[in-house]
Amino acid sequence: MFQLRKYHGDRVQSLTYEAKDKTFSVGILASGEYEFGAIKKEIITVTSGSIDVWVEGSNGWKTYNANETFEVGEHKNFKMKVDKVSSYLCYYE
């Protein structure tokens, strides 16, 4: 099943596919800073642009560019900052 999700005044949008054995989303972020909470473990690959990421419990911000991947543990808060429109692919475990 597909579901379009919009966050932060429609400045972040993702299209999610959810099935028994696999859930993932593709998303676009407009420039800005955003905060999210992960329910499940998230494995996120930047597909265009770059995203600065802070994950709860980390020592600071880290920049991820296209084709780079980062993980957010389940039940962790995280922040994302983008200077220009960027996109990602996220798998949920």
Image: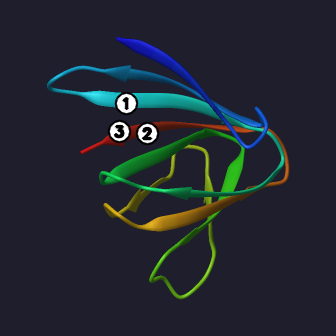
Q: Which residue is mark 1?
A: 24
Q: Amino acid at mark 2?
A: Cys
Quadrant assignment, res 48: top right
Describe the element under mark 2 as helix, strand or loop: strand
Q: Amino acid at mark 1?
A: Phe
| Within-10-Å neighbours for mark 3: few <14, some 14–19, many 20+ | some
Quarter of the image that includes the N terminus: top left
**Disc 2 target residue:** 90
Q: Residue at x 60, y 83 (%)?
A: 60
Cβ atoms under marks 1 and 3 closer than 8 Å: yes
Q: CA distance from mark 2 to mark 1?
A: 5 Å
Mark found first going from the N terminus, 1 or 3? 1
Q: Residue lying furthest left in this view?
A: 21
Residue located beneath label 3 in the image: 91
Q: Reading the chain from its start, which is encountered first: label 2 or label 1?
A: 1
Which quarter shows the C terminus?
top left
Label 2–label 3 contact, CB within 8 A: yes
Check whether the beta carbons of the residues at disc 2 and disc 1 lie within 8 A of each other.
yes
